[in-house]
Image (spheres, rainbow, N blue to C red):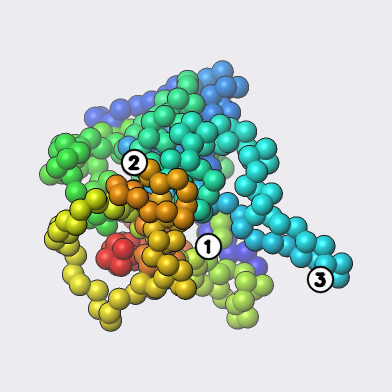
């Protein structure tokens, strides 16, 4: 049984005179995730009007860039028919470049396999993948970086989006001065008020022909009062009561880059409290070298079996910084409350984010 969000009557509110209005976007894509790239590139080639994108960070591309996973996973499993014993090596097939999306294969080929990792045939440094593989493909696209969606307004029928309100932030500090966790910054992203970290510009998008959901967090679904599924919300998912649990789902991970120095160096002080209950890290029967090269993105080593000085790797390991104790998203009712009280902050669980940061 699908759970449908009830229609909420939104109060009409006045638009501040300082709001910047953008009325020439034929297509507005909310979010510049990896999955949105295909829509962005295709639309920019075939639509006659402007394609506009709201990107919450300063790197478009989602997992391949800002979400620090420029060593993309490929299928690894084998499928076997129990009656005929016919076996299909999905992993081997998936890794063949001629079986991959041509545009994705083209992007992966720009930098090549600079990391010699073993999770993927192509592993490269995130910031270079963003600037050299992704950005050159985004011709004829207006990207509003560091911009989050705040509110959606619909027409009297409740079926058509007529306005999208967003907040764009400009950092007051240089990139070398900034060192903050997402859990610290996120509420500020969604506030229209200038802060010690950012100046804000309120944006009002109107006159769109199309609006597309391309965010990592499904924000258009919630803010537009659409029907959607989250967590375990259907009987066949294992909930025999039929009630469901919208906060039961997959673990999530805060990735980070590590460098292997040629000579030992003292670690910088950790600003976070010591974890309780002891270490949570396990090699899961693998060697340290195999975990290090798992998502390595830059190396002078000749292959995935060798570690070299000055290696750079993405730490993203199920036995380490995967966080399973809380769900990333708020419950449906809490997310709806954020929306209906004009306190929207992405519909995500800040406590879970903070605890996942501490585990990482």
Pinpoint residue 299: horizontal percent, then vertical percent: 38, 45
What secondary structure is found at the residue carrying circle 3?
A: loop
Q: In the rendered structure, which disc, 1 or 2, sits on the residue that comes first in sequence?
A: 2
Q: In the rendered structure, which disc, 3 or 1, sits on the residue that comes first in sequence?
A: 3
Question: Which residue is labeled 3 in the image?
Answer: 82
Residue 230: numbered disc:
1
Q: Is residue 60 left or right of residue 190?
A: right
- The answer, for residue 342, to whether it is visible in the render is no
Q: CA distance from mark 1 to mark 2?
A: 24 Å
Front residue of 173 and 4: 173
Look at the numbered discs 1 and 2 and tell me whether their residues touch, using CB distance below 8 Å. no
Q: Is residue 83 left or right of residue 93?
A: right
Q: Is residue 22 above or below residue 338?
A: above
- The answer, for residue 101, to whether it is visible in the render is yes
What secondary structure is found at the residue carrying circle 2?
A: loop
- At label 3, counting other C-alpha atoms closer than 10 Å, the crowd grade (few under 14, some 14-19, many 20 or more) is few
Pinpoint residue 189: horizontal percent, then vertical percent: 27, 46
Quadrant where the N terminus is found in the figure: bottom right
Front residue of 49 and 100: 100
- At label 2, counting other C-alpha atoms closer than 10 Å, the crowd grade (few under 14, some 14-19, many 20 or more) is some
Q: CA distance from mark 3 to mark 2?
A: 47 Å
Question: Which residue is labeled 2 in the image?
Answer: 57
Q: In the rendered structure, which disc, 3 or 2, sits on the residue that comes first in sequence?
A: 2
Q: CA distance from mark 3 to mark 1?
A: 32 Å
- At horizontal 58% and vertical 36% (from top left) the residue drawn is 105
Q: Nearer the viewer, mark 3 or mark 1?
A: 3
């Amino acid at each position: 049984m699908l759970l449908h969000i009830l229609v909420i009557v939104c109060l009409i509110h006045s638009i501040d005179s300082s709001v910047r209005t953008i009325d020439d976007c034929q297509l507005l894509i909310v979010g510049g995730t990896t999955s949105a790239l295909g829509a962005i590139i295709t639309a920019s080639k075939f639509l006659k009007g402007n394609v506009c994108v709201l990107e919450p960070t300063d790197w478009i591309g989602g997992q391949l860039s800002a979400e620090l996973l420029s060593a993309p996973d490929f299928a690894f499993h084998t499928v076997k028919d129990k009656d005929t014993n016919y076996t299909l090596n999905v992993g081997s097939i998936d890794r063949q470049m001629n079986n991959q999306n041509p545009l994705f294969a083209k992007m992966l080929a720009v930098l090549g396999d600079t990391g010699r990792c073993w999770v993927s045939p192509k592993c490269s440094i995130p910031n270079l993948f963003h600037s050299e593989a992704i950005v050159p493909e985004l011709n004829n696209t207006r990207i509003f970086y560091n911009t989050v969606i705040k509110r959606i307004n619909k027409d009297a029928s409740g079926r058509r989006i007529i306005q999208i309100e967003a907040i764009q932030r400009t950092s007051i500090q240089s990139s070398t001065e900034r060192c903050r966790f997402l859990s610290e910054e996120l509420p500020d992203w969604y506030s229209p008020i200038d802060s010690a970290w950012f100046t804000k510009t309120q944006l009002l998008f109107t006159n769109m022909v199309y609006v597309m959901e391309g965010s990592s967090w499904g924000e258009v679904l919630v803010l537009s009062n659409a029907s959607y599924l989250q967590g375990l919300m259907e009987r066949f998912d294992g909930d025999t009561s039929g009630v469901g649990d919208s906060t039961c789902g997959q673990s999530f991970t805060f990735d980070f880059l590590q460098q292997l120095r040629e000579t030992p160096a003292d670690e910088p002080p950790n600003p976070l409290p010591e974890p309780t209950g002891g270490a949570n890290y396990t090699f899961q029967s693998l060697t340290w070298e195999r975990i290090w090269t798992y998502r390595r993105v830059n190396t002078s080593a000749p292959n995935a079996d060798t570690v070299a000085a000055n290696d750079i790797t993405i730490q993203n390991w199920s036995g380490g910084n995967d966080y399973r104790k809380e769900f990333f998203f708020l419950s449906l009712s809490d997310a709806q409350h954020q929306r209906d009280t004009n306190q929207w902050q992405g519909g995500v669980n800040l406590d879970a984010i903070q605890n996942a940061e501490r585990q990482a």
